[in-house]
Image (tube, rainbow, N blue to C red):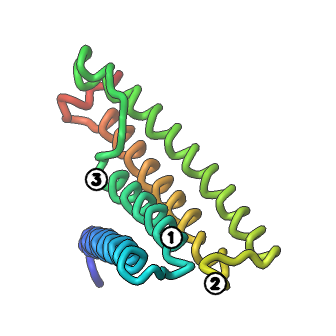
Amino acid sequence: MADSSGISARLDRWGTALESAALVILLGAMMLLAVGQIVMRVVFSYGFVWADELIKLFVLWIALIASVAASRSNRHLRIDLVSHFVAEKYARFPRIVVDAFAALMCGILAWHSWRYVQISIEFGDSVLVDFPAWIAYSLLPLSFLLMCYRFLLSCGSEVVRVFKPGDPAGDKL
């Protein structure tokens, strides 16, 4: 039987590789498409009708995937004033509150973006001339759900550190 921590580490490595590959591919495709569109307009006075909208979707997808990657490695934007003025053990409580709040907000955004995707399906919205919009926007609920999960993990690990016996930085608040 496989060790669960080994499976978890392997899934984490695969997820990291998948996120990085998606970011590189999307950024490269966006740059090629944008430069190609400019060249085609200047040189040939012609461009693809769908290219500008696809570039906007690429920007959205890159931002979402980068946000998921940032929440994985705890490198997201954070206004952290407390930890500069108090000891580590006292800075954990605000971190727990902030991570729980971020998880709650991401959960709410995941729910409402899922509802948006469902409405898009019901109305038969399309993007890129005639492509189903729900496929293009399905990354929204998935990314917010992943960020919610990662913030919950971060919050849980901080709570565990607070109550972990023998950890000098984990003395009770």
Where the N terminus falls, by quadrant? bottom left
Name the residue tied to disc 3. Answer: 73
Name the residue tied to disc 2. Answer: 131
> Helix, strand or loop at disc 1?
helix
Q: Nearer the viewer, residue 72 or 157?
A: 72
Q: Nearer the viewer, mark 1 or mark 2?
A: 1
Q: Amino acid at mark 2?
A: Phe
Q: Earlier in the sequence, mark 1 or mark 3?
A: 1
Q: Amino acid at mark 3?
A: Ser
Q: Nearer the viewer, residue 153 or 163?
A: 153
Residue 64 figure quarter: bottom left
Q: Amino acid at mark 1?
A: Asp
The percent position of residue 50, horizontal first and vertical second, equals 55, 78
Q: Is residue 79 left or right of residue 165?
A: right
Q: Nearer the viewer, mark 2 or mark 3?
A: 2
Q: How many numbered discs? A: 3
C-alpha separation, residue under disc 1 versus residue under disc 3: 32 Å
Name the residue tied to disc 1. Answer: 52
Q: Earlier in the sequence, mark 1 or mark 2?
A: 1
Q: Nearer the viewer, mark 1 or mark 3?
A: 1
Q: Earlier in the sequence, mark 2 or mark 3?
A: 3
The residue carrying pointer 1 sits among few (fewer than 14), some (14 to 19) or many (20 or more) residues within 10 Å by Cα, namely some
Vertical comparison of 96 with 127: above or below: above
The percent position of residue 127, horizontal first and vertical second, equals 64, 76
C-alpha separation, residue under disc 2 versus residue under disc 3: 34 Å
At x 41%, y 42%, the residue is 155
